[in-house]
Amino acid sequence: MSESGHSQPGMYGQGRRRRRRRGDRDAGLPGQNLSGPSRDREYQPRERRVTLAIMQTHAKPSQNAPVSGAPVLEKPIMLMKARDDGGKPGTPPEAAAQPSGPGPSKMEREGQRPTQPVYQIQNRGMGASASSSAVDPMVGQSKLLPPEKMKHSIKLVDDQMNWCDSAMEYLRDQTDMLVVGVIGLQGSGKSTIMSLLSANTPEEDQRGYVFRAQTQEIKERGGNQSTGIDFFITQERVIFLDTQPMLSPSILDHLINNDRKLPPEYNLPHTYVEMQSLQIAAFLFTVCHVVIVVQDWFTDLNLYRFLQTAEMLKPSTPSASHDSTGSSGNDDGAEYYPHIVFLQNKARQDDFCPRNVKNMHMVVDKLMAHSHLKYKGKLSMLDCNIFPGLGQDYLATEVNMFLLPMQENDGEDNLTKAGSGAYPLFSLLPGYRGHPAFSTMVSKLRSQILAMPRCQLSHTILTEKNWFHYAARIWDGVKKSSALSEYSRLLC
């Protein structure tokens, strides 16, 4: 101690303590004199000082880890262990490869847990699978888009009786569909009725109908407009099939006058025309839910004979194995027969008389008594309030028959007044027609047709695209049918 008392220890005591601490730290080798300023003595403490500083910087986070709650040192060590363990047989190769990239930062955020790398890899795998399947929602959205709307009909069977595949692009993979076909004699109004049932209204111009009707020029020369089978599908997934006229004299005249070559299995033109009609009718009886038989007068017995012949030559329902040739059915109870609707087009005012309606139903019922076609019980004019004074029991033998009046223009209808030469009050009223307006009758017919049962066409449930392939196979079987070829030989 100095003479000044405790002033020197107070001034130099701390410095001495620091030097003692540094001396304690620096005195690592025995026999060294710390007071001597030699180069060797100064080099090694600097080297140790640098290494100890590095150790302290790495050691401080580990010592302060419980205080700060964010360990830094041990996580990289665990990461290094996870990298080293990637080659072990118990660790999957994906676990060894995944942490090499952005793994350390995620490990630092998640904290140290032995199962954390596995959990992290699972999340990445799910993200990868989700990113790889990111196209599926777009595909699903494209499937949910509304189907393309048809503006006009297209060919399902051309005039050469060949199958066309152009209708496939308008079909979807769904089973809720209704197939409606039509047959009738020439000029009975088949195409006009199918257009009104599908997409058009009576007020529209007939030149814009989806199924082209006869023009005035074709009517004057006695020709036919439709050839083969035309196809149209609505947004409500109702398929309409318009056909060429059955037993058409204009087609026969075209074959005779144009010297058109007949197929080798047919010798006479009229035989070929009749067999064409039978093929189309037998095809519709197999692939349609509803077949509309159109007549413009009551009634033609040859048409009913034609229906019975087409029913006899109809191919049997193919089995589920698709191995049947279609020549004969194994089980008559499993045979499919469509619903038949008899449509009296261009009906006169007298035809709507309740007594005449009752007689027409009775005649059709007797003519179709031995038929397997479903011709009764599904369509009724009494349910449409067309005859409001008649009860449900008025028609004891009610068949699927509907009367459609002559299509008239509203302007012409307004010209015919009730009492043009009588009282002025009654002259303002429209004339008595005996039936509702034409547009009202078409609307009632459409609602009845669309409400017809949609029976299963084959032994398996068919989608729209399956129906198309099924119909193509049926058409090919009809053209190659042994029963039809045998019947054509009997006609000669």
Image (tube, grey):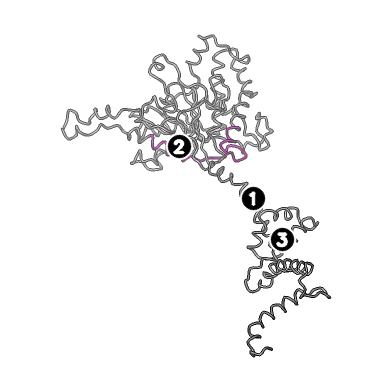
| Residues rendered magenta in the picture | 442-469
Query: Residue 73 appears in which quarter of the rendering?
Result: bottom right
Q: Does label 2 or label 3 sit earlier along the sequence?
A: 3
Question: What is the three-letter code of the residue carrying label 2?
Answer: Ile
Number of other residues with Cα within 10 Å of mark 2, as a class: few under 14, some 14 to 19, many 20 or more:
some
Residue 322 vertical position relative to residue 129 in the rendered view, above or below = above
C-alpha distance separating marks 3 and 1: 23 Å
Q: Is residue 49 left or right of residue 462?
A: right
- Dot 3 amino acid type: Leu
Q: Pointers 2 and 3 in contact (CB under 8 A)?
A: no
- Above or below 236: residue 75: below
Mark 1 residue type: Ala
Compute the Cα span from label 2 to label 1.
52 Å
User: Closer to us: mark 2 or mark 3?
Assistant: 3
Q: Secondary structure at mark 1?
A: helix
Answer whether residue 446 is magenta in the image.
yes
Q: Are discs 3 and 1 less than 8 Å apart at CB?
A: no
Residue placed under numbered mark 3 in the picture: 79
Q: How many marks?
A: 3
The residue identified by callout 1 is 128
Q: Identify the mark nearer the N-term, 3 or 1.
A: 3
Q: Position of residue 141 (x, y in %)?
A: 53, 44
Quadrant in which the C terminus appears: top right
Q: Are the residues flagged by discs 2 and 1 in contact, CB closer than 8 Å?
A: no
Q: Looking at the picture, how far across and down is residue 414, in whole percent?
A: 25, 30
Residue count near mark 1 (Cα–Cα under 10 Å), binned few <14, some 14–19, many ≥20: few
Secondary structure of the residue carrying numbered label 3 = helix
**Residue 167 image point, x, y percent:** 54, 30
User: As rendered, which of 107 and 225 lies closer to the eye?
Assistant: 107
Disc 2 marks which residue? 449
